[in-house]
Image (tube, helix red, strand yellow):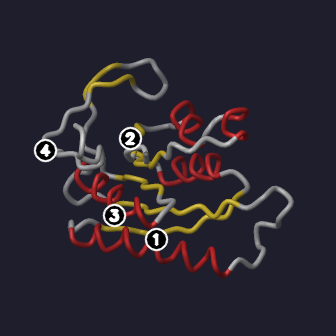
Amino acid sequence: MRGRSPLAVKASRNLQIRQNWPNGTERGTMKKPKRTLVGLKTLESAVELTTLACRLSSRGASLVLVHVIELPDNTALDAEVPDLEAAAQKILRSGECVARRSRLKAKTRVLRAHSASYALLDELKEQKSDLAVLGYHHGRTLGEIVFGTTARHLAEHSPCYVVFGITPRKR
């Protein structure tokens, strides 16, 4: 697998994934998802994550492309942040182009929150998603070491399957 991005995954039309169900009670074969939430954080990962979601989703599925603008706790959620808004729109447009080429319906959402993990969890429940496709970065801050990462929180509390696209570590 060296030299290839783990996100460059081949997914056949009759994909079967054997995994524990999110609540840990069932074991079985996952059906191709009809509603997929794609969490897009950076422009660099938007194309790869959306491509992965398109390959994993069933024909005629709908994607919800989500970017969370994570604001500090002492900042109001309705604060003006035009640079972050513009960046979010650019990231979502990039993902939307990929979905269009794959002939899948895509909605885009920009969320504002103090915690990306809670915002994404709420969105997964609200959209009744069958699958979440999210990125994972290797950088670890002190806060992530103490409190845990968004990826870990979503993996533990998600109401649906979660697939992480993990980019190669930069050397």
Identify the residue under disc 1: 91
Identify the residue under disc 3: 47
Which residue is farthest left? 13
Q: Nearer the viewer, mark 2 or mark 3?
A: 3
- Gap between marks 1 and 3 measured at Cα: 9 Å
Label 4 Cα neighbours within 10 Å, binned few <14 / some 14-19 / many ≥20: few
Identify the residue under disc 2: 163
Measured along the vertical axis of the image, is residue 69 above or below residue 3? below
Residues 4 and 165: in front is 4
Percent of width and height locating residue 7: 30, 48
Residue type (three-letter) at the residue carrying disc 1? Ile
Residues 73 and 35: in front is 73
Identify the residue under disc 4: 12
Q: Earlier in the sequence, mark 4 or mark 3?
A: 4
Whether label 2 touches label 4, CB < 8 Å: no
Q: Nearer the viewer, mark 1 or mark 4?
A: 1
